[in-house]
Image: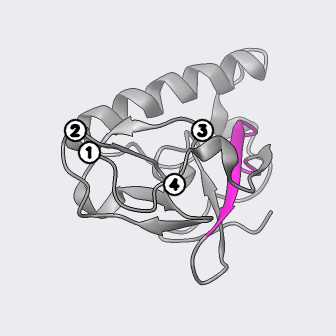
Amino acid sequence: MASLGAVRPETLPINKSTCKFCALPVQWVRTRDDRPIPMQPGEFPAWAIPVDRRWSFTRDRLHHAPWLDGLEKCRLVHLDVCPARPKPENAVMLELWERLRARAERQNGGIPVEQVLLEEEPEAGATLEP
């Protein structure tokens, strides 16, 4: 069941760009405190994502949403599944990380992500400015 005030992601002010670490697409969205956060495109079942990694849209902003239940969809910060970062421990996030890693390598002519990093690896908990 959707939370009160939920809006469809396609109606939000989203700045599409690419990750400066893996060169894959990201969607920049502002949080309630106006911080830009690079989000992984798409929505994921809340039941499969760790509580502390769930994000949601309400009104016109993005916010951390640990309360989402298993029937709802959530968003992920791209850095949690960026193939330029270490593998995540969560099984669903690991599967996405592996698919993104393969996509990045195909996009880069088969060269492993580690060899084509555009910038140094982001630190844990870092947010990227667009």
Query: Mark 2 Cα within 10 Å, few/some/many (few <14, many 20+)?
Result: few
Gap in Å between the C-alphas at discs 1 and 3? 21 Å
Q: Mark 2 points at which residue?
A: 71
Return the residue nearer the eye: 25 or 15: 15
Q: Name the residue under label 1.
A: 1
Residue 58: horizontal and vertical position, in percent?
Answer: 50, 62
- Amino acid type at mark 3: Pro
Q: Is residue 96 above or below residue 1?
A: above
Residue under the point 76% across and 69% down: 129
First to last magenta residue range: 19-30
Write down the quadrant of residue 87 in the picture.
top left
Chain-order first, disc 2 or disc 3 = 3
**Mark whose residue sits in front, 1 or 4:** 1
Query: In the drawing, does residue 61 fall left or right of residue 68?
Result: right
Return the residue nearer the eye: 83 or 51: 51
Gap in Å between the C-alphas at discs 1 and 4? 22 Å
